[in-house]
Image: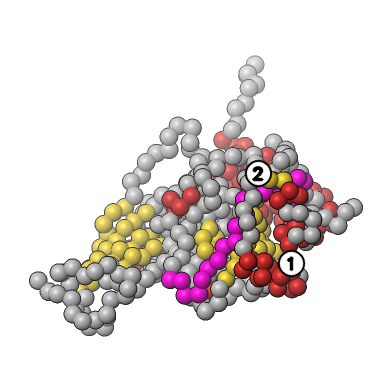
Amino acid sequence: MTTTGEHLLSSVQMAHFVAHGSLRMDAVVPAEMNAEAMEVFAAGIPPVPYGTPVPEAYPEGSFMRRLVEVPEVAGALRSLVGLGPHIDHHFVHVREPYEGAAQPLHGDAIIDVRTDAFDVQLMYYPQEVTLEMGGTLSVPGSHLRRTNESDTGRYQNLRGQSRLVCPAGTVVFLHHGLWHGGRRNDSGTRRYMFKIRFNPTVRQRRLWDTSDLSDPRVADELNTVFPWYEHATGRLELYNRVLLWRALTGDEGFDLDHWVTRVSNRPQEVPA
Amino acid sequence: MTTINATPTPASAPAPTASAVRQQVLVLYLGTSALDSPVVGWSLYDGTGRTSPTTGDSDEPPYETGLAALCDGWRLIQAAQLIPPYPGHEYDVSFLKHEFFFEKLVDLDDAGR
């Protein structure tokens, strides 16, 4: 087994991603790389054309290549988007000290209605992020909502939102649809975040370590209800999550509390 | 008509007009279409320019329910209409559905600004 293979996500972790729309890995990037990143990011990283294969975008030995080859990062990427993903785009986000404004809550790119595929956004934080530094705001469980870019900008705060506070070297993987935004930096420290969006080039089915697929914690994760969900719509979130889990596993009989089975029941047997 | 006195206005605030009364707008997103259901999201816009509420500035809502905002003097302006799903889109999830707009009128000449 390769080093990458040893760090594949488990089914429980994948279920967490499907429910939350994100997966957080604290301090997985070594300190020396974090120090190097601060210099690399300050100097700026030129863009690459949309849809560039990783080896073309990031030559062997480059900082970005070594970042995506950190074993935990590589294992998560392989589990989420498979081998050979393309770089959609990347960007160094900078929140200046006392800058006075926050990003509106948004999803990246345009509304994306895929139900059996998704892009993944890697967000890397090379320095410790405190609450005052305006770490990324994200809304757990918002990724399946069909909203377009910053049309959600009216929403300032939602119950159960995540205001990222993390140690240096933290990487967060986001489903492309997750609502997020850079918070206002109220500190005197410039804050960096490096984002890479990955497009899969293979079918996203059972790419992770599926040996724990029947672990009851999978259903527990998928059943997560977030405090900001409206009562009725929260049930639709579970319904849509079941459909995504079916797409990812190929298990067309999977369900949570009979949600999908009940409303798709069309018995064909004719009484004698 | 009252005019603004010499209290400094934040640089980001628009230039004062003749009236000394300003509108604060509170948007509450509720768990159901009932005004007394729990707050799940909130936004605040301060027409006095004294504060600058923004995205991700608090994890705790200002009120537990919409009714609690009424009890505190906020005036309800608008509640979201209930619109049935379009056929074929019954399982789609999108924007928060139960949006309630409130206002409070604030006299800039009041003490404690």
Left or right side of A66 for A102: left
Number of marks present in the image shown? 2
Of callouts 1 and 2, the N-terminal one: 1
The disc at residue A39 is none
- Amino acid type at mark 1: Val
What residue do we see at 51% from left, 44% from top? A111
Magenta-tinted stretch? A77-100
Which residue is the extreme one toward the left? B1
Q: Which residue is mark 2?
A: A51
On the image, the x and y values in percent for residue A226 come to: 55, 58
Q: Nearer the viewer, residue A6 or B83?
A: A6
Rendered view: A112 above or below A65: above
Q: Which residue is mark 1?
A: A28
Viewer can see residue A187: yes
What residue do we see at 39% from left, 69% from top? B53
The quarter of the picture where residue A267 lies is top right
On the image, the x and y values in percent for residue B56 come to: 47, 66
Rendered view: B108 above or below B38: below
Q: Nearer the viewer, residue A162 or A66?
A: A66
